[in-house]
Amino acid sequence: MDGGMTSHFLRCGAALAVVCLSVTFAFAADATPYSNFGRDIAANCASCHGTDGRSRGAIPNLAGVDAATIVQLMKEFRDGRRAATVMQQLAKGYTDAQIEAAAAYFAAQARQ
Amino acid sequence: MSGRHAVGARQNRRRQFLKAASASLAAAALGIRADNAHAAAAKVVVVGAGYGGATAAKYIRKWSRGRIEVTVIEREAAFVSCPVSNLVIGGSRQLADITVPYDGLAKWGVRVVRDEALDIDPVARIVKLGRGEALGYDRLILSPGVDFIYDDIPSLASPEAQAQVLHAWKAGPQTVALRAQLEAMPDGGVFAIHIPKAPFRCPPAPYERTCQVAHYFATRKKKSKIVVLDSNEEVQSKKALFTGAWESLYKGYIDYRPNSSLVDVDIATRTLKLDFENVVADVINVIPPQRAGAIARRLGMANANDRFCQVDFLTYESTAQRGIHVLGDAIQVAPLMPKSGHMANQHAKVCAAAVIALLSGEEINPAPVVANTCYSYVDDKQVGHVTSVHAYDRAQKTMLVVPGSGGLSVTASENERVFAEAWAHNIWADMLT
């Protein structure tokens, strides 16, 4: 029983050390370990494109759209290669990592 | 619990321990306290169901998968949108077109109580309502909008005076009443609009309203004129777009006078008294200066110039009251962040994610981003926009515009109207259904 508790604590201690290290490295490297990263960026888009990307009107639907397609479109907007009204200006506000994470979120949503 | 699935339970405890350990470490790294490990019982009360409050209520239910109880306190029976309300004044929309019922929030399990939040006890964490109900909360979200400051317009101090000289800066009865005043005005009359010093709710809106009244005059009352008395030194948003429309669509209708601070109003003679001149008009629209809604001010939360509420941009928690978050036009904005409905909707999602994380002992988003897209109609068909993207700056602890992002329409066009209409319906659904 004692041995079990000790080894349990040791395991927890080891795990805690790993968590500590990963948190430290994550912050040091400026990469986000935040688990809702894609969901939260995608929520910005939802104001115009509808909740989870399900649009009701002329603004394109994003829910269930292939992630690679969204990423490619966003990069074309950002680089000025694709004409748009607001999307060139908005796309310039997001990093590759943010665009990719939001695209993955939309791709995983049911089209309805 | 010990009788069944003992191994699974132990693994579960271990997972919970690790989760709690990582969350508390992350929270410690961010200087944030996780204050409730039992999300199942957590209660959130939201005061005000506009662009900020309604969005926060829905998204807390959605993202917590119903684990957090959400009650919304709202005075009005239905949501009426400020964006697009200038078109009711211009005559191309009815109030019904910009009204959305609150029923849709019930689908998310949000309890909507039609009442007024009279008082808050931030220590006991209780909101007292007008009809006597008292609601306990773990986290409170205030989205109180703005109140008007009549201190420097003595003649408009009374409710009777305010009922005659309209602001129409909260969509609803005043929007319809201002339209009625314009319809009752004989052709050949003068409409005068006074604009307060920035910051005020919706920077482009006074200039959009000027366009909408000009559109009405140019199509129905061609002998009438508009005087725009702006306390500011120039048009505050989409300047080229609006001045371009005034030149091309409404030449001869609009007399724009910058640096025109209001001293008082003579209601009987319909005179706007300025520092160096008086302007007599048939219909007067005074947009008074604004500050955070009274409920936030009473709690000492309007700690920016005694007008707006400073918040932590990671959580939208007040810097003056722990456990109380503030959204929308009531906050002291970050640099170049407009007071807009769209921005309130974006504040609300950052806040919703943070509130869930704080109540669950999970990590909050260390790098939130918000964006603004705002359309303005220069007549009944042509639209232009302004956009911006703002990212959290860890060193300055505020939201800063992402360099190179954002921009404006050079001119208004019919091409953008379909997007403006789709924007309205999608954002109303994003808040309310």
Image: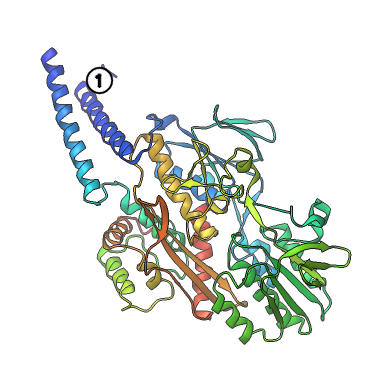
| Position of residue A91 in the picture relative to residue B4 (left or right) | right
Q: How would you rate the neighbour count of disc 1 (Cα within 10 Å): few for under 14, some for 14-19, many for 20 or more?
A: few
Looking at the image, which residue is at 39% across and 52% down?
B396
Q: Nearer the viewer, residue B321 or B59?
A: B321
In x, y percent, where is residue B427?
50, 59
The spot of residue B211 in percent (x, y) is 65, 76
Residue found at the very far front of the displayed protein = B276
| Image quadrant occupied by the N terminus of chain B | top left
Secondary structure beneath dot 1 equals: loop
In this picture, residue B227 sits left or right of residue B299: right
- Chain letter for mark 1: B
Above or below for B408 versus B312: below
Picture quadrant of residue B401: bottom left
Q: Position of residue B207 (x, y in %)?
A: 63, 72
In the image, residue B179 sits, relative to residue B399, either above or below, namely below
Front-lying residue, B38 or B372: B372
What residue is shown at x 61% (from left), y 67% (from top)? B205
Dot 1 corresponds to which residue? B4
Q: Quadrant of residue B298?
A: top right
**What type is the residue that disc 1 sits on?**
Arg
**Residue B339 position (above or below residue B59):** below
Residue A1 visible in the current orientation:
no
Q: Is residue A111 left or right of residue B425?
A: left
Q: Residue at x 60, y 51 (%)?
A: B145
